[in-house]
Amino acid sequence: MKIKSVEIYGYGQFVQRKVEFDQYFTEIFGQNEAGKSTLQAFIHSILFGFPTKKENEPRLEPRMGNHYGGRVTLILDDGMEVDVERVKGSAQGDVKVYMPNGTIKDEAWLKAQLNYINKKTYQAIFSFNVLGLQDIHKHMSEVQLQNFLMQAGALGSTEFIGMRELINQKKQALYKKSGQNPEINRKIEEVRNLEYQIREESTKIESYQRLTEEHEKASRRLDTLKQNLNQLTGLFEEKQKEVALIDQVQEWKGLEADLNIEPLEFPEKGIDRYETAKIQVDHLERDIGLRVEKQQQLQHENEQLYVPEQTLYQNFEAIAKQEDRVKQQEMELKQTEREFSQHDMEIESLKSHIGWENCHDDVDSSEAQKSYASETLKQKQAHLHTLQQLKKTQDDYQIETVSFEEELQHLNSQLVDDENFEKKKVYDQRLLELKEKRNLFDKMKASFEQETEQKQQQQRRVRGASLILAIVSIAFAIWMFVTNAMVAGVVLTVMAIVFIIGMTLFRSKPVGYDTQFSEELAQLEQEVAQLEAEYDLDFDLSTQYQLRDQIAQRQQQLAILKTKIQHAHTQHEDTHTAWTEATNQLQQLKSSLYLSENLSDDLLVDAIQTIQKIKDHRQYLVKLNEVHMKLSKTLDDFYTEVDEKIGTVMKRNDKDTLFHDVREWLKSASQDMTRHDHNMEQLNLLEKELKHLKHRLSENQQVIQTLFGAIGALDEESYYKHHERYQRYHERLARFNDLTHFLENQNYGYEKSSKLSEKTTAQLDEEYQKLSEQIDNYNERFLEVQSEVSDLLAQMNHLETDDTLRHLRHQYQLLRNQLNESAEDWAALSYLEALVDEHIKQIKDKRLPQVVNIATDIYNDLTSGQYVQVTYANEQVMVRHQDGQMYHPIELSQSTKELLYIALRLSLIQTLKPYYSLPIIIDDAFVHFDAERRAKMMKYLRGMSDDYQILYFTCSRDSNIPTKQLVTLNKIDK
């Protein structure tokens, strides 16, 4: 997975900002506060969610109210591009993933693509900065530094080691086998004490049980009294309800008697319908009167208008339509006459340009003639240019020849004779041989001296051993002679003599290694001195070699120049002959065209073109004459036709005003005809409207008669009185229905309400007083029994408060529960500790060997081969120097430790590549490196496989990074 680009809607200081990244390596350069950290936080937020309140990170919401969030374009491992958009919504934002085919995925799909890695794990493995490297420089012990490097290379973070230590601390705080202060140890001791106290208090339980039985009996009597009292209270409340509802029930019964008549009828919305119809009748009568008046006005106006015959109007229109054509023809006629004059003047002008007095139509001015003249002129100019070039070339060759000759003379003056040159070569060879033999002699002398010293030491050791063996043999021989073992004594004596003789004879002869070399050196020195004395060898042999090479080159170049000069002279003569021939051809062409011989050759082609123009103008004049005659005849025919068609209505006095008069006549006639047609349309429309209005008037009058007939009304007054009686009837009916609903809501149906309406208020008050007296009696008996129960309960409470049994049992149960919870916590911590240890062991056994092997190659490359191996054994990370020495990380320099940390992080990323193919983010992690080491680090990162994408944030720009891999963030003014 790679990040192609990010588009920020609003995040921190960025608003509507888009940044594109290279697929392999991108350096994001910017000064402090330019937004590098904000851009990193934006990438983390889009992929893993906006920071919540639980996280110690700022949300970086834009302060100006812009849209919070943005989108990141990802290139998946299969090459598919998707857009991940996260905007403000839930705590971590709302996510949409836009697929290439237009479908939209949710956050679950995105988490699956990220292989369910969270932001903290991603930052611990794939994103590191200078703060992570600074942790190495803290005052760590060897164990702490080992754990830090192992976490970076194997686990990817400090969570597992820190979790294991935290679990162990919590377990120790809960329980120790022989401890007293841990929580479980203290609670076990408290439980034992409570058990002893409970056994002592259990003897008092018999008297408590007797009081409990008496309390239960009194409680049952109290419950019976309470049930009876509740029944009386219910009857009493029902009687109160009857007293409150007696007035509404009696009103309801009275309305029932009044409404027991035949219902009144009235048309639905009768008043509105009547008033609407009456208004419509008034309006319609007024509209009919207005339209009749308008109809009379239009008829009078039509009588005053002039409407010509259709044939005459069409003749005028036909003449008006020919206005453009006729005027165009008149303009063309005048244009033809002007062109006659212009072409005559143009012909005279062209004749003067070429020196003609008369026109010569028989002259050849075709394209072939013009092409021949142009080609001949080009050849002449090309020959002239070639002659100039050859002349310049000859001059250049002559200058170079003089320069080479002067340079040869100068080089020959610096050259030594051949004898001294050969002796100098012999001299240099003998001098080099003398120097090499001296160096060899010095090296052999030192070697021979060392070998001699070793042989002398060996001789001393052998002679010492022989002396010791001789003494031992003599001592054993004497002891053998004393013990009468003669044969053994003789043998030992002989051996002692042999050892003494060998010690005397074992001496190395001196080696005369320097005699022959001394003689050779002396001979070489003599030869060198003899050459120095007999010849002048005070010059540089390499310089003489160069001089001889330069002389040979200049001589060869001089010979080539002479050949070039001869060739250039031959070319000059041939070109001059061709130029003379071209000049003669041009003179013959001028004569055939009746042109002056003084005419410039450059104007010859233009003269041919001018002759052709004269011919074209004369041909065009013939065509213009034919057009002029045709236009004159067409115009005469048109004016004759006009007199025939409209001469009876309009007399033609002037050709120029003919079409103006025709247009004015058409305009006036058209207005009258249009007005007449419009008036006729208005009259037809008024006839239809009058018919429709009369029909509507009849309908509304019929509506009024229908409403009156529905209730038998004779006029408007009787109609309104019947409506008032109808309204009063329905108001009383609505009141009756409201009371019915009210009583039903109070659970009083028709029978119950009718029965209550038969009672009087005095009867209800008497029943109310009787129920009140019964309730008072039951309350007195209830209070007596309740007092008895309270006395028994007080005695039981006295026993409970006086004796601590219940309290002790309660404390015991609480303490047991607390002890069980603590024990469960301790067991859970033990289980978690086992899980963490097993997980760390699996990581070390499986992943760590791969990480260490890859880290070895990376570390060897980053240190330029100074450290050749990274090892992990016996819970320790070690590095091997190129001289074979093993170093603990704490013994390394600060920058070398940082390189080891980086190598382990990068090797972990490469090991996790099959599971997590994510971009690598580095935030200025190399600020403590020198220039050489930083360049080495950047070279390695840029040389990583194309499967990785690296985003490198820095405030120090690298000039070696190409522009396509560079993103510059400028500081935004706040």
Image (spheres, rainbow, N blue to C red):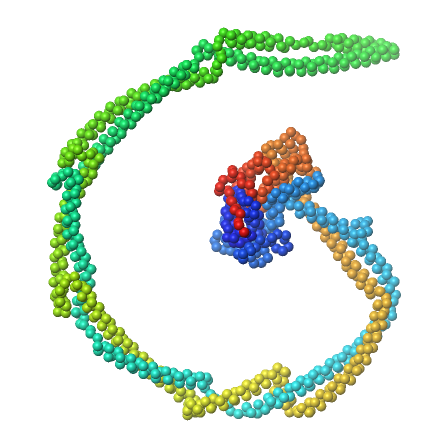
Quadrant of the rendered structure where residue 227 is?
bottom right
> Which residue sits at x=65%, y=30%?
884
What is the total number of numbered labels drawn onto the structure image?
0
Q: Is residue 23 above or below residue 580?
A: below
| Residue 63: % across, % down | 56, 56
The answer to whether 780 appears left or right of 753 in the picture is right
Residue 778 higher or lower than 632, as above or below: below
Residue 450 on image: x %, y %:
67, 16
Residue 693 lies left or right of residue 750; in this view the side is: left
Viewer-side residue, 506 vs 941: 941
* Viewer-closest of 556 and 490: 556
Q: Is residue 955 above or below residue 582?
A: below
Between residues 798 and 964, which one lies in front from this camera angle? Answer: 964
Q: Position of residue 439 (x, y in %)?
A: 59, 15
* Quarter residue 143 falls in: top right
Q: Is residue 312 left or right of residue 838?
A: left
Identify the residue shown where x is 22% and y is 35%: 602
* Image vertical order of residue 884 relative to residue 12, above or below: above
Residue 69 in view in this figure: no
Looking at the image, can residue 633 be seen?
yes
